Amino acid sequence: MAPAYYPVTVCRSDGQFEVTLKNGASKELNRPTAEQLDKTPDAEGYVDFYEPLGLEDTKAKDWRRKIGGMLMHVLGGKEHAGRSYILKEFPEGYVLYEHKKYNQNKVSEDKGKEKGKHAAGVFERQDAYMYGHPQGRKKRYRSPADFFPHVLWLATDEEGDPRNCSCKLCSPDGEQEFEEPPVNPDATMKKEIKPAPEFITPAENKQPAPLPARAGFKTPDAATQASRPKPNSLVAASSHRSAEQELDSMANGIYTYRPGELVWFTKGAAWGLGVISKRQAVNNKPRYLLQPLSHPLRYPPYQIKEGDNVMRPWLAWTVPSTTHPQIRTMAYDEVPWERVLAGEFGPGDAEVDGSILAAQAINSSYSLFDRIDNPLAVPGEAHYRGMFLGGEKIWVGEPVRLRGIGDEIIILIIHKLIERTTQSPPTSMVTVVGDIHKLVSMPNPYKDRSEWPVPALPDRMVADLRFRNEVADVAGRRDWLEWRLLEPAARRGLSDIRGRWYESRSLLPIIKPPDFVKQEIARGEMSDTGNLLNTRGDGFAAVLKRKKNRKDTFGRAVPDDLKVSRGLDGPESDGLFPDEVQTNQDLFSYTSGRFLYNENTRLREQYVEFDANALLREAEKHIGPSHGHAACIIKLAEGGFNRVFLLTMDDGFEAIVKIPYRITGPKHYATASEAATLHYLHSKGIPVPRVYGYSSSESNPHEQASVNDINLPSGFVEIEKKFLDIPFGSIGSMYFKGDVPSGLQAALYATTSAEKDNDTEISCPVKFTDAELDGFQEQKQLRFELNSVVNHWRDEIGGISEDGWMSDERYDDVVRKVAELKASLLATAEGDEEDIRLLEKGWLFRDREEIN
């Protein structure tokens, strides 16, 4: 028995049977032309025509049932669930036409056969089109799904303003005017070939759409730009997109994460929390500059992350509890971090706790950026192009996830960001204006992909939706996904927003294992990442606080000099990474490792500030004008006593600049002796760096420095022979005569044997008594045993140098092992206060006073 259909009537209509032409002088019928309605066959027997369909025609009833069902699904509620509905009639002025094409000669040949007149039989074409749109006959709907948003607008919009309609014809970037292609008698119907959808994995090279012209990107040629579809413009004309906004709106873009966002990142075997400072594309792969969050007394060095799969969105996971239970309920700025580091709160990881509390503070904040001058804004009201909401960066014109019921996937496409403020008391209220859509699944209403509509949605949503439907199509599933408009021009507050919307196509391979993704693809399914991410505020209370900007939001959790790049909207230097250009602080500071204890002391000792520009100019004088000007200087290496820089001239010539640390001594003699020794060896034909100049005076504006070329020695046997052939007459350091007093100078060469015989033996001025020598012997064994114990514990935690140095990569692991070692030793004390006191006092791996 056929199901009963309940009729649905739409009373309002904007349909027109005839329209006024653009010249205003005449009108035309809003239907196919007389030529298109003509059923006269051509010379070869082809009949190509349009004809109107009655309401009871099979195809017209199919349109009415689908539109009626979609209307009641959106508007009917639970009380109407389980019933079947049909549109009683199309809105007044709208008429459904069918375009048919066949060869009448073939009809005669097939007469009497069982094969019917359909696309697989006689008819080569049977397509339905809805005419009646007030913009004329060239604006027509091609499917029930195309027409439905317009019918929904007719049924619900009290204002009757076509600008509120989201259908592809009424929206600002609707379909272009349609011109019927000429009939090709030789055209034959071909079986559709379904290409497999191309899945974007983190390791693949994503091919971004053309980018605005900037350093590091190539602008496409005119032909490429002309062929690219224009993005759907869902932003008011007065708020045009910036270059960075356009980059983030592109379908299948290269970046998942944005500057200023809070992310999880790989930290050895664990995960840490950090913020994206900058990003850049290298060989079509994303590269990010990340600053880990921490407590305010010591900041971990920045990290460069290659690719998207070594990070996760902030809302991918729930933030854990702090390792120190006593500070769990404190705000970041309320924690006495000095006492935490001193161990007063027991064992734990202060850096991890700092990142956790900082992330909670960031998640509870918002700030707006790129204010738009809007002449329609009322006093106390401001419009913005984007905002940072919690840990994420969001633009006008893109979708955000909304809170829904159960597993509903509901998004809002932002049209406007409006902030209303008051001065007394100071308040801020943000309203988000946009269209609300819901992701719905239904049986696929289309015969093949050629009928699939292109919805009037942001490019990223269109591309992701098509990919997910292709996944189902390739697997043979007759499922269809689409974004259904629920509420146009809706107004919501920030508390209604769950977070950023991500494409399932690109994010699912990042947050799920490869086998999970492959199994879903094989089944023709694709999980929506909206339900795989958390909601902002999950896990802890998050009362939103207005912040001035992103720097104000991060507070003391990052270094003071951290800058969040504006990308394509900022200067070119804004996008340079530290490995491309170094700041003066990078040049002055030690950055080649970490120290487990007394780190601040070590860093102060190895901090050497100098005038970089003066050093470049001085180097030019010594090297000479033949190589041009000194173009740049970068840090090359740093050891225990000196820092080495690479200086590059205009013509590519390179030289080494070496500057000693403050602890290197003796201050004057170390640099002077090295310069003299290298100069002497070079004069003897030994391949050592040539010294162009040096200064051993601390009053020098660029400190004590030497400038050498980079010729490295080879043939060590020959070099050693040259050393042995030099007839030195004294033992000691070598200097230029002007660098040492005459009373300390000795002859460089031994001249005659008689002079050697006249040399008097110089005895050592330091004397020890027999008792002192015996005491040294008695303590020798004790020192040996103590050194053995110290070396044992150094090896236990993974091996560190005597001053506590280790590489950046090993630091987190060593800190963890030290905490575990101390906890195990405290446990063996079994509460004995004296043992615990002695352990704390003699603990090897702690900051302590040093004797200089």
Image: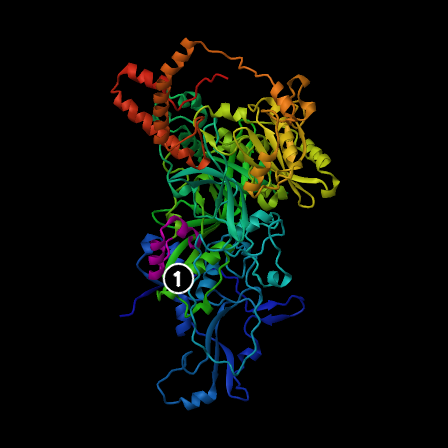
Judge whether 418 appears above or below 802 on screen.
below
State how many labels appear.
Answer: 1
Q: Is 562 or 549 nearer to us in this picture?
A: 562
Point out residue 829 in the picture as x, y percentages from the top left corner.
26, 20
Q: Does 819 sit left or right of 278 as displayed?
A: left
Q: Is residue 569 visible?
A: yes
Whether residue 12 is in magenta: the answer is no
**Residue extending furthest left?**
830
Q: For the N terminus, which image quadrant?
A: bottom left
| Residue at numbered disc 1 | 471
- For the record, the magenta segment spans 504-527
Dominant SS type (magenta): helix
Q: Does 577 sit left or right of 536 as displayed?
A: right
* Colouring scheme, one of rainbow, by chain, secondary structure, one colour: rainbow
Q: Is 387 or 716 nearer to us in this picture?
A: 716
Judge whether 312 appears above or below 519 on screen.
above
Residue 721, quarter of picture: top right
